[in-house]
Image (cartoon, grey):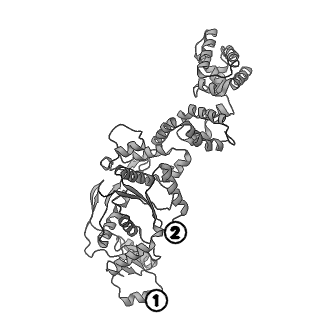
Amino acid sequence: MKTERVRFAPSPTGWLHVGGARTALFNWLYAKKHDGKMVLRIEDTDQKRSREKYTEGIREDLKWLGLNWDEYYRQSDRLEIYERYARRLVHEDKAYHCFCTEEELEERRQKALDDGSTPIYDGRCRDLSEEQKQEYREEGRDSVIRFKLPEQQPSVVVPDRIKGEIEFESLTTGDFVILKSDGTPSYNFACVLDDHLMEISFVMRAEDHLTNTAKQLLLYDALEFDQPEFGHLSMLLGPDKSKLSKRSGATSVKEFRENGYLPEALINHLSQLGWSSKDQQEIFSVSELTEKFSLENIIDSPQVFNREKLDWYNNQYLKQAELDRLVELALPYLRQGNYIEGELSEGEREELAEILRLIRPSLDQLEDLLEHDDLNIFYGPLELTEKAEDVLNWETTSNVLNGLYERFTTRESLAPEDVSSIVKEVKEDNDIGYKEVYKPLRAAVTGKVSGPEIKEVISILGPDITGERIEKALKNS
């Protein structure tokens, strides 16, 4: 049986977009599902816009997402291949040298627009004699190589495994460039050659490539290559239903990494944008995604990238994360927020793990730790809210806090159950309700009337700090 081979082929002209990440994910899942191979191909022939930092960023982001590849190529290493095949097409009279200058092409384009016509290359270099070509060369003109569209251009049918057959009655570009004057290939030409030579069996990419696919099918025919199968994914939209862009907020994987999202949260959200498991399950492990993924369940309609839904996924994973991992992930943000300086002792790491366990239900992203009110409970400064001040002025508060202080400060440690038993004693001694004990206790220890479970907070702070805060509250009440 033939091995399924897919590819993810980004251009390193910017950071990896979440739309590209979704394409990579679906290709990766397809390869895993069919015991196939995924090729990472960096399409870096746009010399003006390609940057090495973006290439490295794409690789890092894919690794962070867990989307590892089996083979790796860069188109800039393959220029001789593209030139060789372009010259072959010229030799077979399926392509030709075009000497039109940029200025001439722009002038004709503008005239077509002024006439209300669609700009299209008019083929004037199609049948140049050798003498005319030589004259142009002697003038110092550079040439590109253009693909010769059939004289009677047939309609092009794209057989799409996701959308079904799509027919293009004609191509409106005219004879298109396959090799530029600097020796770099056009996107469509390099794509066809690479997909063929890398034995790609299935090309899955975004639907804005559909017209490219139509052109590529003509190149497959001219080169006498077998065609791979194709599938085109629906577009990702922003909340306003326009194409997802910077206006929608963060759109690159790099930004989501820096904001403190977990890779499994982003993977889960992206997997649901254009694919459905046909059940009510929302949280998937990678193995579950791989098992359930199928082309039949891909949804062929535009999908909205929902930041609130991503926050929900991330919150779910933060609540499930191992505490040791959570500590490592949180430390950069806590240092940036000046909550922590230097290296932590083992005891401090254990305490931080308990703090994070307590507050993580309120975290949508780790960047929330830069300014998080509950962290001030443990790292200061502690400030009383107006509601907390009101509670500390209740008639019963002084007796309650004195009773709590006497009992807390005799302990070497305070487990949550110890706090519960002490609160019960003070409640019964004063013949009041639990509210009249817990509210003043929370106000004195945290400066607020709501927040994390107070028994857990006191267990982390310990009897000394808890006693100091109660004593300070008594003095100020």
Q: Residue drawn at (45%, 67%), measured in percent from left and top?
A: 75
Estimate the x, y position of residue 22 in percent, counting from the top left. Answer: 42, 51
Q: Residue drawn at (51%, 44%), measured in percent from left and top?
A: 262
On residue 48, the disc is 2
Can residue 123 be seen by looking at this rendering?
Answer: no
Can residue 21 be seen by looking at this rendering?
Answer: yes
- Do the residues bearing badges 1 and 2 touch, measured as CB atoms within 8 Å? no
Q: Residues within 10 Å of mark 1 (few under 14, many from 20)?
A: few
State the residue position of label 1: 138
- Mark 1 or mark 2, earlier in chain: 2
Q: Residues within 10 Å of mark 2 (few under 14, many from 20)?
A: few
Q: Residue drawn at (43%, 53%), measured in percent from left and top?
A: 19
Label 2 amino acid? Lys
Rendered image quadrant of residue 101? bottom left
**In the picture shown, does residue 264 fall above or below 173?**
above
Report the front residue among 310 and 92.
92
Left or right: where 213 falls relative to 22: left
Label 1 residue SS:
helix
**In the picture shown, does residue 45 fall above or below 250?**
below
